[in-house]
Amino acid sequence: MNKHEVAEKYETELRMFLIWMKNRGMTQATQRAYMNDTRNYLHSIYPMELNQAGKLEVMGFLSTSRERGAGDEARNRKLSSLRALYRALIELELLKSNPAAAVAKSKQEKNRIPVYLEEEQLETMFGAIEGKYRVRNVTILFLMAYAGLRVGEVHRLNTMDLTEDGLIHILGKGRKWRVIPLPEAIHAFMRLSLEKRIVPRQSKEKAFFVSQFGRRLSIRMIQTLADETLARLAARMPALRDKKLSSHKLRHSFATMQIRRGTDIRTLQELLGHSSIETTQIYTHVDNRQLKQAMSNIADRIPNLRFQ
């Protein structure tokens, strides 16, 4: 059995699922992730007909994934992919039941503290950004570290999404829009980035960030920019070498700064574009410095007792 045999066997199901996802307005990144999970699942049940597969086959696939190293988060994403697959084929009247809906998600650790950068570490990082496309790159990292944008959101930004009064319109997960009022420092860099913007190859291209080849800057290139910048920072700061740094950690840093400055959880939820406040609550962690400060607040209230 090879990939071609599996693709041929389930050609109709795969094609219908892709059409369904596009019709739902799912991002290309989500489509790729769901299709990849779906192909792996179909490979695991081949040559069984999809309408014959049940809860046991779904659980078997997820169990094998865990044995191969998938954690709770990865397992839950694969389950979400399969739930979407079956939901799509039910809506398109190819199937009648969704066995993935009967499989429970793994309980993820709720109090896991996200990895983030301290403010002085961010300052050092930005001070080291150089090169021909410095303005563009600083602007991108500003948006991630000081406005909380995801990589995909930066990728999707168009020139008309920035207003003259400093508002930025962001197309987030689930095709949901949110509007963030930018600090003047970021707004100024965005205006400068527009002035220095590379002319796109296609006149109709409205991408805010354009590559040296005249195309919309890809998600992979934005991730690479962030990852390489963070790698250089870690090389200069030994305290960061054991941390798993990535582009998404800049978003964690933004959320952490907001919480430390007293931003309430509901407002932070809006800024981050989270659909559930439970997702936002992981940022309500405190560090040792805050714990010490909290305890020092009551130090003078402790009775001064003497023991004989």
Image: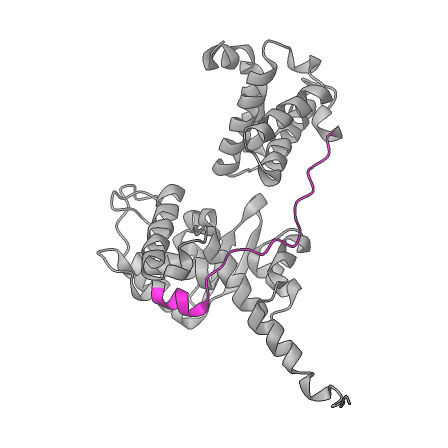
In the picture shown, does residue 27 fall above or below 66?
Answer: below
Determine if residue 208 is in view.
no
125 on left or right of 37: left
User: Where on the picture, by quarter, is residue 25?
Assistant: top right
Furthest-left residue in this view: 132
User: Residue visible at 52% across and 67% down?
Assistant: 257
Q: Which one is in front, 290 or 78?
A: 290
Name the quadrant containing residue 193: bottom left
At 72% from the left edge and 24% from the top edge, which residue is drawn?
99
Q: Position of residue 14 (x, y in %)?
A: 55, 20
* Quadrant into which the C terminus falls: bottom right
Task: Give the color scheme: rainbow, by chain, secondary structure or one colour.
Answer: one colour
Q: Is residue 11 visible?
A: yes
* In-front residue for pair 94/62: 62
Q: Position of residue 12 (x, y in %)?
A: 56, 15
Identify the residue at horizontal 67%, vertical 56% (top origin). Answer: 277
Reply yes or no: does residue 117 show up in magenta. Answer: yes
Q: Main secondary structure of the magenta part?
A: loop
Residue range of the region highlighted in magenta in the rendering = 103-124
